[in-house]
Image: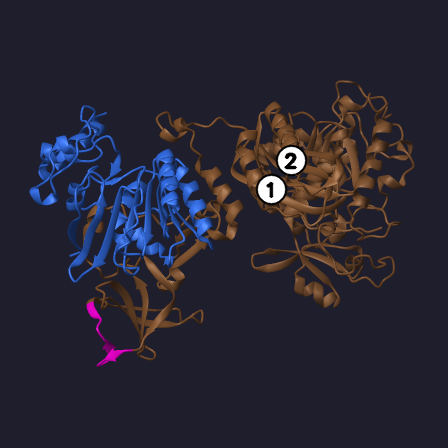
Amino acid sequence: MRRSIRSTELALTDASKPSRFKHRLDHPHLSPGITSIKTAGLSSADQVNPDNVSSTQAVWLAVYLPDVCLAVCDWDDIGLNLGSDSGKPRLVIEQKRGQSIVYAACEFAFEAGITAGMKLLSAQALCSELQVRERQPDKERQHLISLAENLQVFTPMVHVELPDAILLEVRDSINLFGGLAALYDSLQHSLHSFLTSNAKGQKEASESPCFILAGTPTPEASLILARAGQPALITEIAAIKTALSSLPVSYLPLAGVVKNAKRSFRQLHDMGVDNLQDLWRLPLSGLKERFSDNFITLLERIQGKAIDVRPAHESKPCFSQSLDLETETDSRQWLSYGCEHLLEQLCDWLGTINAVTSQMEFVFLHNNRVIERMNIGNRQGNAHKSQWLPLLNLYLERQVLVEPVNRLQLHSQHVYPAHLQNLDLFRQSSLAGCDDWSTTLAELSIRLGESHLFFLNTQADHRPEKQLTLFSSEDALSHRPECPKAVSDKSQLASNNLIGSRPCWLLNKAQRLDKLLSGWPASYQRISGPERIESGWWDGVDMRRDYYVMQDTQSRHVWVYRDLENQHWFLHGLFA
Amino acid sequence: MGKLFSENEQQLERQGSQRISLDACLDRADIWKGHRYKVPVYKSYKQGLKDASQVDSSVSSVSTGYAVLDALLPSCGWPASELTEIAVPEWGQGEIRLLMPCLAELAARGKRIALVAPPMTPYAPAMLQAGIALEQLVWIQTEQMLDTLWSTEKLLRCGDVGAVLFWGKLNFQQARRLHIAAQAGGSHGFVFTRSLNDQSSLPLSIRLQLKANQSGLAVHFRKLKSQCGEVSVQLNWH
């Protein structure tokens, strides 16, 4: 079994005692049934019967996944036999103040003496063969969310507690599952199967995934118990204090509660408070004077004396529907009918949940083998078949199937709630039934391809070639904060001063002007200049140029420069 | 409220100092003149500015930014819902500079401006200098004339697009079809071509030729709706 050590804010506060955060070995899934679950720290007289739960009492189950950050990373030795000592120890690091700090270490690394909060260099000194990966918080979040969505079969009240836990409030589901014991068992089973199937072959089949499940009437207490590695199940509020009493105070989640968690822990230590038991003994009024109100509220939340509201995770709606064709076909007409039918179902569904979608994917299959995928998107979400149908037809016109298909699928995951839009009352186009901008853009990008649409922008660089930047999507442009504003002062526009003005057309490659007359381009007439542009020594594209506006033989205004390195003349742009 | 009044007063003072005459004010293309009817313009610009009765107010337009051109054009500016052909011997005569004031005005109104298949890379700093907000500008690169025409039609039909500038040579049917698209979308269409002295008859309201010269740009109207004969105008850059 793999154990892992996590670095939390708490761990950093007390890095001298890393063994504190080592999880207990007795995981709940090893215990055969609920009868063997011990409520930690309780004497046998205080033990509660888990089935004897009063109906008004909330039951919060905390699922703690200590090695979620290890599980989401891709490792080199996937599929290798890790049971032997051949596997390289794994480390997950994070960057803190410019230094790589060990965030989590696998069991082998821990045995080698590597603990969370250690610098990467020290870890490498302890063990030469390490696999090191950067922490991926987004992937961890995704992993937790997908687990939370799986656990929604137990209760609608599932809360994702970042970065490594999930909370479930199961009071209303106890009767459905035939008692808390049965619920607990099936939850364990479900967790086990989910984590094993998601392990992507990183672990052996025999090795059990690591999770800790703890339950108390308050969410904070459940989390503390689970993070302390104590698979307890407590159903009475009065028993919480006793269950937690043996735990060190460093398990208190102070990081988000008080301003300086480190100082608070030191303060507690100086007061002689090491275990939570010591804390329970102190009068609240005295603590209130030493710590902030938030600290007292936290203690009250743990004991169920203060209200603790956790938002339930809402899964994103998504649409998935398939259609079996009677015969294999690659006829555009038949496919068009099929796609239209699926699209109609999607639009009906969107209508019933009052939502819009911005992207959908048609999949063409032959005997469950994917032949072609077709992505259709519209930047502005839409729920109307009439808006999607032209895009669909446009796509189908260009689509060439390499093989006939007998099954169509339609998926849409980008579903958003529909907001009423404000349309311009006097806008002519809305009256005349013109296409709007987003539809036109979507049509253009489907027909021509995204790489044929450009939005222009400038960047702060003096070199003319570097000044222009291109984006293929409008969103990328609008999200750039430094998007410059157009000159609004009309007087500036009216000025005829050509110095510093830029040409409309820029030649992709500057044209060498060969014919020179006493060092100047022959038959070119200088209008303004020179404007010296000298920049770029730092990135290797060094340039030293004198730019002139000139009139050529056809009386066109052109942008010409002399390269100061070699005194050659080049035509670079046209004032079209 | 107090602040608002004082601002208005300041504005009035500023206008007063510029002394805009009533006629000049009425000549502005963006003043709506409900009781005017379409009256053909017979006088050329040399005979003086049109008086208000000769302004074709049935056509919405955007000022060209050049007084002589505004005076010459029946709609007092580049007409919307129409196609304008601009022929040049070589790219770079000043054809984009001619349209810049109009494009800046359209962009300021929140309209999109599309460049379809331009011959060279549009240079963003120049557009900014001309007062065109870059987020209003889209550049579409096509490989075939068919795609150019298709994209142009789509864009002209789109109500949010103010002007479509495209490069290519049109035949009668294509010009007719794009004209209908421009009418549907109410946008300005500008087609740039290098074929001078093209004798073919196209259903375009304005066809002009540009030739850069020493002092500026010679604009030669080969065809102007409701105008007899050909007219030439000289625009000076300086």
- In screen coordinates, is B238 left or right of B81? left
- In screen coordinates, is A170 left or right of A340? right
Type of the residue with mark 2: Cys
Chain shaded brown = A
Chain shaded blue = B
Magenta segment, which residues?
Answer: A515-526
Q: Which residue is mark 2?
A: A339
Classify mark 2: helix, strand or loop: helix
Q: Which mark, residue A405? A: none
Q: Quadrant of residue A435?
A: top left
Residue sitting nearer the eye, A358 or B208: B208
Q: CA distance from mark 2 to mark 1?
A: 9 Å
The answer to whether the residue labelled 2 contacts the one labelled 1, judged by CB atoms less than 8 Å apart, is yes
Residue B133 rendering spot, x and y as whole percentages: 34, 46
Residue A246 rendering spot, x and y as whole percentages: 78, 39
Q: Which residue is mark 1?
A: A396
